[in-house]
Image (spheres, rainbow, N blue to C red):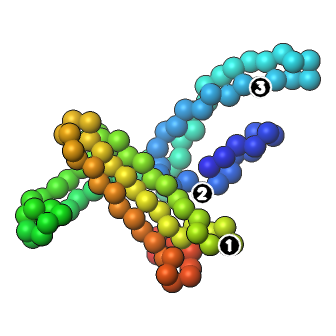
């Protein structure tokens, strides 16, 4: 997401959450005021959503035969859209999770339609 010089916020949010933005507004006489704005990105039904990662391993190398569950309060979540098409449409989203409470717990998940030549579409 981005904000332009006129104050228009645009883009496609990937992760629902509450974000805080530092903003400075300056008038034509160079007077300014600073403020912190709260931006709430919600799901289409108005909720903040829940981030969670669940995996049940059947003994393969990655999971080691264990069950895993991480939620909002268990660590730091990031999501990144990537545009790999000439039309500027998102066709790759990467979600990263790491736990400051459990050293070495890092998960990276990638969803992509690059090889299909179509953009990712929410809910499909």
Determine whether label 3 and label 2 are within 8 Å by CB: no
| Precedes in sequence: disc 3 or disc 2 | 2
Let me know if residue 25 appears in the view: yes
- Residue 109 location in percent, x, y? 35, 61
| Precedes in sequence: disc 2 or disc 1 | 2
Q: Is residue 23 left or right of residue 81?
A: right
User: Where is 75 relative to 92, above or below?
Assistant: above
What element does badge 2 sit on?
loop
The residue under the point 49% across, 55% down is 80
- Residue 100 location in percent, x, y? 26, 36
Return the mark for residue 100.
none
Viewer-side label of 2, 1: 1
The residue under the point 64% across, 54% down is 11
Give the distance between the C-alpha atoms of the residues marked 3 and 1, in whole angstroms. 35 Å
Q: Is residue 92 left or right of residue 102?
A: right
Return the mark for residue 86.
1
The residue under the point 15% across, 62% down is 63
Instruction: Judge the density around disc 1: few (<14), some (14-19), many (≥20) Cα neighbours within 10 Å.
Output: few
Task: From the viewer's side, name the closer residue of 53 and 16.
Answer: 53
Label 3: which residue? 25
Give the distance between the C-alpha atoms of the residues marked 3 and 2, in whole angstroms. 24 Å
What element does badge 3 sit on?
strand
| Precedes in sequence: disc 3 or disc 1 | 3
- Residue 31 location in percent, x, y? 84, 16
Label 2: which residue? 12
Instruction: Judge the density around disc 3: few (<14), some (14-19), many (≥20) Cα neighbours within 10 Å.
Output: few
Give the distance between the C-alpha atoms of the residues marked 2 and 1, in whole angstroms. 17 Å
Q: Quadrant of residue 12?
A: bottom right
């Amino acid at each position: 997401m981005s904000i332009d010089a006129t104050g228009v916020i645009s883009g496609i949010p990937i992760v629902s959450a509450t974000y805080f933005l530092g903003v400075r507004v300056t008038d034509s006489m160079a007077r300014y005021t600073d403020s912190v704005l709260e931006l709430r990105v919600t799901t289409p039904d108005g909720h903040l959503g829940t981030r969670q990662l669940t995996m049940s391993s059947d003994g393969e190398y990655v999971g080691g035969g264990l069950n895993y569950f991480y939620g909002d309060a268990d660590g730091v979540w990031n999501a990144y859209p990537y545009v790999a098409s000439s039309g500027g449409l998102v066709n790759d989203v990467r979600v990263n999770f790491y736990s400051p409470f459990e050293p070495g717990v890092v998960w990276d998940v990638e969803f992509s339609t690059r090889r299909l030549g179509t953009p990712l579409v929410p809910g499909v």
